[in-house]
Amino acid sequence: MTTAVVSKSPRKRITSTKVKYALTVLAFLLPSAVPLVCFTFYPMAGALWTSLHKWNLLSDMQWVGLGNYAHLLQDPATLRAFGNTLYYIVGYLPLVYVGGLGLALGLNAAIPLRGFLRGMYFLPVVTSWIVVALVWRWLLNPSVGIVNQVIGLFGLDGPGWWTDPTWAMPSIILASAWKDLGFVMIILLAGLQTIPQELYEAARMDGAGWWSRLRHVTLPMLSPTTFFVVVISLINGFQVFDQVYAMTGGGPAGASSVVVQQVYDLTFRYSQAGMASALSWMLFLVILAVTIVQMIGQRKWVNYA
């Protein structure tokens, strides 16, 4: 008596393997996927739904469709907030990158107390933003601040800083760059340490000086790290809030009002949660568009070799 052996077809075996693989991946992703869905995707969907309504956080929602978006696009306060946010980014990004690169280059060399200096420059990064903002508010105080006192030693009158509409945003930019220099320094320092020393030795043999090595070796090889820093800094720049809230509150006369602060004001000062949700989604779409442009543009200048 013979027993027939029935084997699975190749197609069924492949399907079974794919299902097992998908279930294995899902099991590993669940610990992070569940919080991501609960605390990111679900609130985003809720904000999108809220943005289509008029809601004061207490009464029932009233459907307005795209009315909140239309109102915001015509609101001078919204345009001013986006303009101030862009002003902040234009001033902040070059300052924090050039400063961070300078620190990374200096602390990548074999100098005394190198580890201690790295820790000291990184210390502001782990300091509370509110603490940093209040310290800089005191440093830049027009009458008793240390900065204006030092400027006065040279016979010059210091500006009004955060009390002056012209200097309010530069004050915030200065404080923000000081706090974030350490973060950019650490990231660029890690990138510098991955560059093969053979490239520098070959450049020296060809007679390249310090500037030529920086331009033709360091910066091209550092471009993937630079791309990461630029993307992260831009995203953080669009979401600037803490330092604005603590230093100027958006003033004087709205000179330092930014988008996230306006979202806060619309929600908690004016009880216009629908409008605030619409502004949040407008900011999200702007950040998404800028990030996509960067992802496309990086193919032309980022060297992954």
Image (cartoon, rainbow, N blue to C red):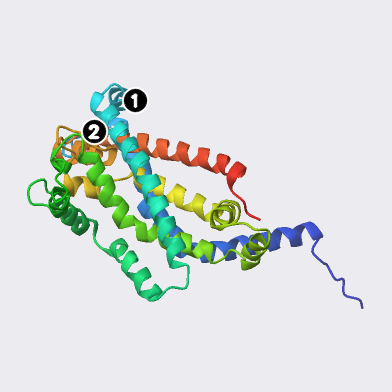
Q: Amino acid at mark 1?
A: Leu
Q: Amino acid at mark 2?
A: Met
Asked if one can make out residue 235 in the rendered structure from this viewpoint, the answer is no
Q: Nearer the viewer, residue 52 or 1?
A: 52
The correct choice, above or below, for 255 with respect to 223 in the image is: above
The correct choice, above or below, for 83 with respect to 242 in the image is: above
Q: Which residue is mark 1?
A: 66
Residue at 63% across, 54% down: 304
206 to the left or right of 120: right
Q: Secondary structure at mark 2?
A: loop
Q: Position of residue 49 (x, y in %)?
A: 34, 36
- Residue 61 tag number: 2
Q: Position of residue 215 (x, y in %)?
A: 56, 51
Count residues near mark 1 (Cα–Cα under 10 Å), then give few for <14, some for 14-19, many for 20+: few
Q: Position of residue 7 (x, y in %)?
A: 82, 67
Q: Residue furthest left?
A: 143
Mark in front: 2 vs 1? 1
CA distance separating discs 2 and 1: 14 Å
Q: Nearer the viewer, residue 85 or 102?
A: 102
Q: Residue furthest bottom?
A: 1
Q: Secondary structure at mark 1?
A: loop
The correct choice, above or below, for 155 with respect to 54 in the image is: below
Residue at 67% across, 63% down: 205
Quadrant position of the C terminus in the picture: bottom right
9 to the left or right of 135: right
Of mark 2 and mark 1, the one earlier in the sequence is 2
213 to the left or right of 105: right
